[in-house]
Image (cartoon, rainbow, N blue to C red):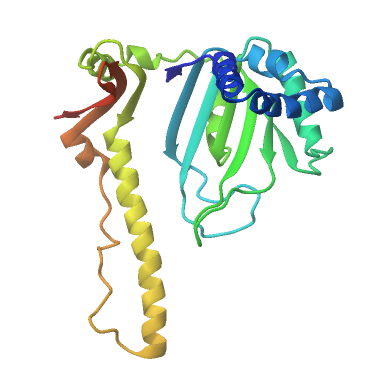
Amino acid sequence: SQRISLPGVYAAIQEILNGIDPMMGAMLQMPLFQLKGSTGIDFEKDFLGNIGDELFSSESPSQAGLPVGSGKTGAPADNDLLLWVPVKDAQALGAALVGLKNLVGSGEEGEGAFTVKDYLGTPIHTFKNPLSSEEGAQEKFISYAIAGGNLFVCIGTTSPLQAVIRNIGKPVRPVWEDPEVLGGIEKLPPGCCGVTFTRMEALLTNFFREVRERQERLDRALKDIEEKMGPLEPPLLGFCDPSVKLDPREAGRFFGMATSGLYRTADGIFMHLRVAHR
């Protein structure tokens, strides 16, 4: 997580641009004036003013295994990125987001640029056009929802959003109370910001899963070539054995939590990375 003031960042950018050339600062303001004139949305007040000063993010293997809304089958799973920030006034922020959606043509009943699906009483808004992805890989979509006093934005499938909505109101242990997280923080230099935690067990398992899926796709492509052109010399098959699956417990045996943090000295900004070894 990171503690950051988005209104402060915006004000700093405005100040820098004005310092370079007042015309550059005016260029930043111009589309915001147009936005307010066409939709009534005050970007600074209605959007930035309703977002808290702490940004959280998490990344995990997709649980869906298929793209959302694409109709494709057999595409390998990918990672889902979930971002969330506390919200001061959910109703006002929701209205501002609806105004922004209308600006790009959200329409009604799922027509236009966005689809809206109700999940346990919470609307999940998904931008219809997928982000670009590599050939044969799962398409990524941008979705958002306001729930439990937070704005959640997901890149990938809607699985993380659905999991968050299902667990709202349930007692959970804060990440800052996790013994491994606390142990990692104690080892960081004082004054760190932008602290990041990675469970190496999940990271390594996902890495080897991705290697296996890529090898399977490569093997299929090479076999098609051999059927048309004959044996390849030297043999290119067998980059790795796709039948071997990494047991998460084996990865966890050797590595624990990876902790990193940014800190500043007179010489510059540095990153400290620590990986717990078991």
Q: Is residue 44 visible?
A: yes
Q: Position of residue 19 (x, y in %)?
A: 57, 20
Image check: 34 left or right of 150?
right
Q: Quadrant of the C terminus?
A: top left
Q: Is residue 121 visible?
A: no
- The picture places residue 67, in percent across and down from the top left corner, at 57, 50
- Please name the residue shown 34% across and 90% down the image: 230
| Residue placed most toward the observer, 5 or 208 | 5
Instruction: Work out whether 58 lies above or below 177.
Output: below
In this view, 251 is above or below 190: below
Splitting the image into 4 quarters, where does residue 126 fall?
top right
Counting every numbered tag in the picture gives 0
Residue 18: image location, x then y, percent: 61, 20
Residue 109 lies in what quarter of the image? Answer: top right
Of 123 and 247, the residue lying toward us: 123
- What residue sits 72% from the left and 15% below the top? 46
Residue 119 falls in image quadrant: top right
The quadrant of the picture occupied by the N terminus is top left
